Amino acid sequence: MPILHEMHISGNCYKVRLAARQLGIPLKLIEYPLEARRTRTPEFLAKNPIGRVPLLETDDGRYLAESGAILFHLAEGTKLVPADGWGRAKMLEWMFFEQYEHEPYIAVARRWLAFEPKEALETMKHLVPEWHAKGNAALSVMERHLAKDDWLAGGSYSIADIALYAYTHVAGDGGFDLGRYPAVSRWLERVASQPGYITLSETW
Ligand SMILES: N[C@@H](CCC(=O)N[C@@H](CS)C(=O)NCC(=O)O)C(=O)O
């Protein structure tokens, strides 16, 4: 069975658990708690020099890092990846957007405001307004698209929706007000009603 090296509270790791569950792919989970910092040990860096989870370990001992790459590997050839080339490219467009415009602000605000000790947050506090401005800009881009389309790419639920759902649905933990984004809020409900949906905190 493939192994997912993960941190259960992480949205990046939740993306992989959600897709795997919806695709019926069994995974063995190995937990790396945030406070333990075990993703930076020589042992883990030998598996993934980036020093981060999620990391997928295949049955034949290969390693794949980066949540978007893992999603693509698990979902290729299934209904979670559009069959046509343009649809697949639009799916990747949203997944790259997630990594550059969305996750660095929305996930990071959540981490520091919801999970790091208060004293540590003091040292980062000056960055909060920038995280909120850039995160809200990303949510506004999603709002404009989702006011016109039910799904992000290819006309149906795909791994782009999973990638963007992971940190959008918990953006409130980082101080974002999702009430400002009605189309995004309706899309969150559509994602949560897909077959095989699991919550972020759900035990495996
Ligand atoms: N771009 C990566 C980001 C992965 C990432 O930031 N992982 C965090 C948890 S969400 C992590 O491993 N943090 C521990 C560390 O940096 O030491 C992805 O999408 O998988």
Image (cartoon, rainbow, N blue to C red):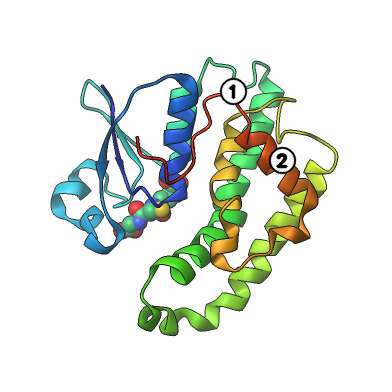
Q: Residue furthest left?
A: 43
The residue that appears at 64% across and 21% down in the rendered structure is 82
Measured from the top left, where is residue 170 in percent x and y?
A: 56, 54
Vertical placement of 26 versus 190: above or below?
A: above
Image quarter of residue 202:
top left
The residue that appears at 44% across and 24% down in the rendered structure is 74
Q: Is residue 203 left or right of residue 191?
A: left
Q: Is residue 183 left or right of residue 41?
A: right
The residue that appears at 64% across and 16% down in the rendered structure is 83
Nearest the eye: 123 or 97: 123
Vertical placement of 203 versus 175: above or below?
A: above
Measured from the top left, where is residue 169 in percent x and y?
A: 59, 50
The residue that appears at 20% across and 48% down in the rendered structure is 44
Residue placed under numbered mark 2 in the picture: 187
User: Which numbered marker is on residue 144?
Assistant: none
Q: Is residue 73 visible?
A: no
Quadrant housing the N terminus: top left
Q: Tell me if label 1 and label 2 are in contact, CB under 8 Å.
A: no
User: Which numbered marker is on residue 81?
Assistant: 1
Measured from the top left, where is residue 94 in percent x and y?
A: 65, 41
| Amino acid found under the numbered disc labelled 2 | Trp
Image quarter of residue 4:
top left
Q: Is residue 62 left or right of residue 199?
A: left
Please rate how many residues cluster around mark 1, counting C-alpha atoms within 10 Å: few if below 14, some from 14 to 19, many from 20. Answer: many
Q: Is residue 53 visible?
A: yes
Quadrant housing the C terminus: top left
Measured from the top left, where is residue 18 in percent x and y?
A: 47, 34
| Amino acid found under the numbered disc labelled 1 | Val
Q: Is mark 2 within 8 Å of ligand 1?
A: no
Q: Secondary structure at mark 1?
A: loop
Please rate how many residues cluster around mark 2, counting C-alpha atoms within 10 Å: few if below 14, some from 14 to 19, many from 20. Answer: many
